[in-house]
């Protein structure tokens, strides 16, 4: 394969027309590897030096390695995937199906060449369970005498959605949890004036984004620390861009005309990706608005014909109460001998 190397943001522009088409032809087709996500993350959260490696076969884009080189806290020069670590739940090299082995070999060739800048580590974080990278790349690196290891990084609990909401309640939930969900739905409807909705993209989206940011900061002390000015700018940008391309699912529940909870999700490739949440602990917390909203969103996902309800990374207990099952996420680190 022929390599074209881009070392600044013009690479994103050059690859834009082919990026998402390649992603759709890969085994790693996830929203976090789309051109829209990758460019937004880099512009708001990226640091160090950008290295976009694009390989072509017979003139057609066959693989992309979106990397950046930076100095880590230990003073080592480290390559990481664009999007790594904090706010991109699935990442990988992007290779057309059948080109994975060639892409791994080509990446290692470049890392070992004189064209590559000095480096100590190459880290590939947030690799999905189905990815070949966390299995095959360490083997190929070890064959070169380099140290390489893949380790379990986290889990992503998800629900395989049936054809109907009633089937979900019957087949995915325990008897106790099914009763609890129905009780909460009934109680909130009997005791309050309640509605839930998904925000529309367009001119009216910005006030909804404001409301989400406010609820996010209210919900937990650690979320207040997480939502820095820099992170807020990223969240605002990504919600607007996802809205423009039709992948945004920003839902709210109002109780007696007061926004009590919000869920920020994305719809992509048959999945609903539940990305982040916020709630007002002083507004009707006893009525469990977050649980009610999550239940309604599961129902909505089924009605939309989505196949998977993905809670993304983290093993919080509430995810399993909704019937989620774990899938693994791996991290692969290569050390040059």
Image (spheres, rainbow, N blue to C red):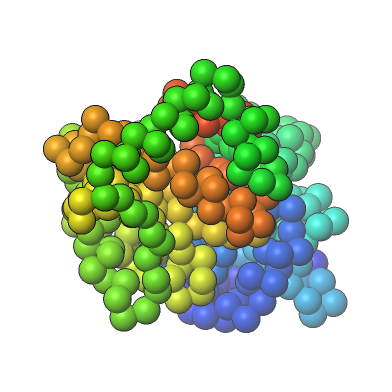
In x, y percent, where is residue 128?
63, 41
Placement of 15 over or under 44, stated as above or below: below
In x, y percent, where is residue 57?
82, 71
Query: 105 or 237: which is nearer to us?
Result: 237
Left or right: 66, with 290 as reference point: right
What residue is shown at x 48% (from left), y 49% (from top)?
297
Asked if residue 125 shows in the view, the reply is: no
Left or right: 78, with 122 as reference point: left
Placement of 23 over or under 69, stated as above or below: below
What residue is shown at x 52% (from left), y 31% (from top)?
322
What residue is shown at x 29% (from left), y 46% (from top)?
261
Q: Residue furthest top?
A: 176
- Which of the 4 quarters of the picture holds residue 286? top left
- Which of the 4 quarters of the picture holds residue 155? top right
Left or right: 112, with 116 as reference point: right
For the C terminus, give its image quadrant. top right
In x, y percent, where is residue 260?
24, 46
For the N terminus, give its image quadrant. bottom right
Query: 167 or 272: which is nearer to us?
Result: 167
In x, y percent, where is residue 183?
42, 29
């Amino acid at each position: 394969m022929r390599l074209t190397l881009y070392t600044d943001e013009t690479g994103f522009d050059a690859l834009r027309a082919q990026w998402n088409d390649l992603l759709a032809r890969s085994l790693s087709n996830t929203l976090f590897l789309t051109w829209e996500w990758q460019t937004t993350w880099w512009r708001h959260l990226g640091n160090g030096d950008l290295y976009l490696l694009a390989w072509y076969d017979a003139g057609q884009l066959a693989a992309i390695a979106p990397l950046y080189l930076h100095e880590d806290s230990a003073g080592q020069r480290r390559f990481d995937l664009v999007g790594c670590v904090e706010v991109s739940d699935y990442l990988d090299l992007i290779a057309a199906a059948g080109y994975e082995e060639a892409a791994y070999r080509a990446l290692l060739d470049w890392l070992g060449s004189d064209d590559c800048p000095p480096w100590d580590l190459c880290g590939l974080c947030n690799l999905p369970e189905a990815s070949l990278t966390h299995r095959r790349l360490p083997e190929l690196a070890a064959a070169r005498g380099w140290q390489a290891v893949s380790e379990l990084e986290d889990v992503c609990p998800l629900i395989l959605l049936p054809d109907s909401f009633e089937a979900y309640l019957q087949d995915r939930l325990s008897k106790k949890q099914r009763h609890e969900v129905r009780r909460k739905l009934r109680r909130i409807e009997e005791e309050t004036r309640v509605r839930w909705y998904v925000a529309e993209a367009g001119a009216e989206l910005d006030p909804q984004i404001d409301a989400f940011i406010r609820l996010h900061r209210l919900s937990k002390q650690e979320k207040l620390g997480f939502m820095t000015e820099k992170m807020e700018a990223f969240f605002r940008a990504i919600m607007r861009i996802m809205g423009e391309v039709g992948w945004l699912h920003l839902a709210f529940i109002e109780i007696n005309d007061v926004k009590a909870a919000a869920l920020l999700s994305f719809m992509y490739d048959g999945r609903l990706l539940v990305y982040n949440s916020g709630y007002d602990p002083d507004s009707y917390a006893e009525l469990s608005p977050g649980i009610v909203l999550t239940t309604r969103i599961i129902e909505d996902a089924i009605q939309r014909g989505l196949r998977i309800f993905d809670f993304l990374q983290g093993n919080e207990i509430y995810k399993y109460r909704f019937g989620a099952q774990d899938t693994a996420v791996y991290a692969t680190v290569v050390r040059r001998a």
